[in-house]
Amino acid sequence: MQKNEFYDSPKWLRVRKRVLLRDKYQDVWAKRYGKVKAAEVVHHIFPRDEFPQYQYDTWNLISVSRQTHNTFHDRDTDELTETGMELLRSTARKNGIEIPEKYMVRKGKGRSKRRDAYYT
């Protein structure tokens, strides 16, 4: 399914609305830091192109502002940033899902660094 086809589909629009209602149309990431921001985007924590089996699972979706959403993705490559990978790792641990190898590497200056804490 093409990207626009998916995001315009009735099933996605229903799930998106359910998640926004669950999160009271507030940016849940900003809320963690005591900030109040309106949410207009529903973010797939496990990217839907890599993990289509989770694309409609509400545990894999959070409501965020556009500004917050842009912190989860490198807009040039569309890859997850370290912040996006951090969220993915914590969600995986919380749901008992094995963390994919590519998300166990922490990006840093210069070379990538492995963190033993990500294996727990």
Image (cartoon, grey):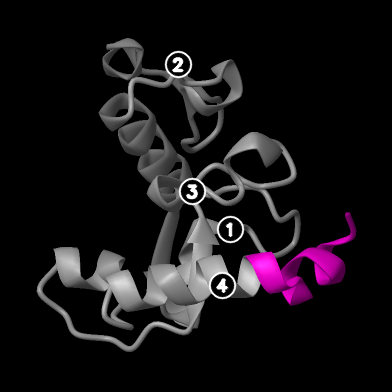
Residue at x 57%, y 51% (from the top left corner): 56
Position of 27 with respect to 108 (left or right) is: left
Q: Is residue 44 above or below residue 69?
A: above
Q: Which residue is mark 1?
A: 73
Of badges 1 and 4, nearer the viewer stands: 4
Q: Which residue is mark 2?
A: 98
Residue at x 10%, y 74% (from the top left corner): 34
Position of 44 with respect to 38 (left or right) is: right
Please tell me which of labels 2 and 4 falls first in the chain: 4
Please tell me which of labels 1 and 3 falls first in the chain: 3
Image position, residue 71 (x, y; %):
47, 64
Residue at x 71%, y 56% (from the top left corner): 78
Q: Residue furthest bottom?
A: 38
Of badges 2 and 4, nearer the viewer stands: 4
Q: Residues within 10 Å of mark 4 (few under 14, many from 20)?
A: few
Q: Which residue is mark 3?
A: 45
Q: Amino acid at mark 4?
A: Arg
Check the picture and name the quadrant holding the N terminus.
bottom right
Quarter where residue 19 is shown: bottom left
Decide which of 92, 22 is in the foreground and name it.
22
Q: Residue furthest right?
A: 2
Decide which of 78, 15 is in the foreground and name it.
15
Please tell me which of labels 1 and 2 falls first in the chain: 1
Calculate the distance from the C-alpha at mark 2 to the C-alpha at mark 4: 28 Å
Please tell me which of labels 1 and 4 falls first in the chain: 4
Q: Which residues are magenta?
A: 1-11
Q: What element does badge 1 sit on?
A: loop
Q: Residues within 10 Å of mark 3 (few under 14, many from 20)?
A: many
Of badges 1 and 2, nearer the viewer stands: 2
Image position, residue 66 (x, y; %):
50, 80
- Residue 101's disc is none
Q: What element does badge 2 sit on?
A: loop
